[in-house]
Image (cartoon, rainbow, N blue to C red):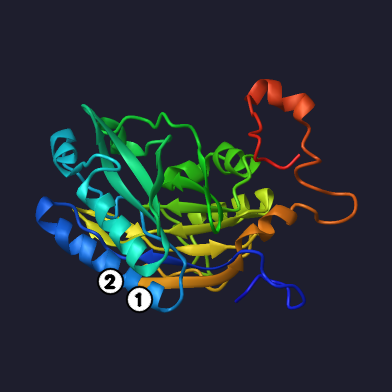
Amino acid sequence: MTTTSPHEPAAAPARVAVIQFDPQVGLENRGANSEQALALAAQAAEDGATLIVLPELAATGYSFRGRAEAFEHAEHVPDGETVRTWESFARQHGVHLVGGLAERDGVRLYDTAVLVGPDGYVGHYRKAHLWNREKLWFTPGDLGFPVFETPIGRIGLLICWDIWFPEVPRLLAQQGADIICSVNNWVWTPPPIFDKSGRCMASYLTMTAAHVNNVFIAAANRVGSDRGARFLGCSLIAGTNGWPIGRVAGAEEETILTADIDVVSARSAQIWNQLNDLIRDRRTDLYDPMLGYTLSPAAPR
């Protein structure tokens, strides 16, 4: 499915792919995690994908037994083996790739998403909102919510639990993000988990964030179980109107979802009609002093 107009050529055409698979924790599994992730990513690239999104902690698996084990799995960014491998893949296939790993910076550990492209490392984001036992080994992110300029458009990153905090996609959109890459390890929670359509709450939160910010969101989750933790799939690519472009992935399948979009069309998507524009209609005079939102020079005025 495409979001480009049949009458106008796309300004920044891209085929976006999200990879849903089952990485496992344990140093003995790191090679297999990398091989499976990049095998699926290679399939996406062969199918024409130019932006590929892997899940949270795709390199390591999720369920660490303690901080010491998390530290053993962690790597430096951008000089670690995983980022170098992703850089090589991106160069070889001419794609941008986003993926999650455990980052080591001195004695601190971060749950990190990394963006690489055909020219190498672009940037990274450290998860700001930590879920459950993550707080026992990871430090909350300290990089803010950066948006990265790339040849295919402005790319923002968020990680999993972040989507429950509407400030995150809003701040990324306010800084001019054309597409937000959401890397996730959404877990099973007390029921009900899914509605009758098979969508989970995280799917709807992603759709809502895309809708209220008029921004594309490519959300990659994982599946399977990892030391007793179960993950629920539901990966999707949401359009600027919030609706999924294509299907929402199932709860059990390893799969690749793709969508053809004009990335920078998000820049004109804010105008819904002659009188309503989400950016223009914001009452910054009322709530910005309380919330502390600030616009970057890249943000639309």
**Residue that label 2 marks:** 39
The local crowd at label 1, few if under 14, some if 14 to 19, many if 20 or more residues have their Cα within 10 Å, is few
Is disc 1 placed on a helix, strand or loop?
helix
Instruction: From the top left corner, tell me how far across and down residue 238 is, in percent.
Output: 58, 62
Type of the residue with mark 1: Gln
Type of the residue with mark 2: Ala
**Residue that label 1 marks:** 43
Residue 194 located left or right of residue 62:
right
Please identify the residue farthest to the front as the structure is shown: 119
Instruction: Locate the N terminus by quadrant.
Output: bottom right
Is disc 2 placed on a helix, strand or loop?
helix
Q: In which quarter of the image is residue 261?
A: bottom right
Instruction: From the top left corner, tell me how far across and down residue 163 is, in percent.
Output: 51, 45
Instruction: From the top left corner, tell me how far across and down residue 6 is, in percent.
Output: 73, 78
Q: Which of 98 and 237 is in front in this view?
A: 98
Instruction: Locate the C terminus by quadrant.
Output: top right
As drawn, 200 above or below 174: below
As drawn, 104 above or below 85: above
Whether pointer 2 and pointer 1 mark residues with C-beta atoms closer than 8 Å, the reply is yes
Residue 280 located left or right of residue 39:
right
Residue 148 located left or right of residue 98:
right
Per the model, the C-alpha gap separating discs 2 and 1 is: 6 Å
Q: Nearer the viewer, residue 121 or 210?
A: 121
Q: Which residue is drawn at 9% across and 56% down?
A: 28
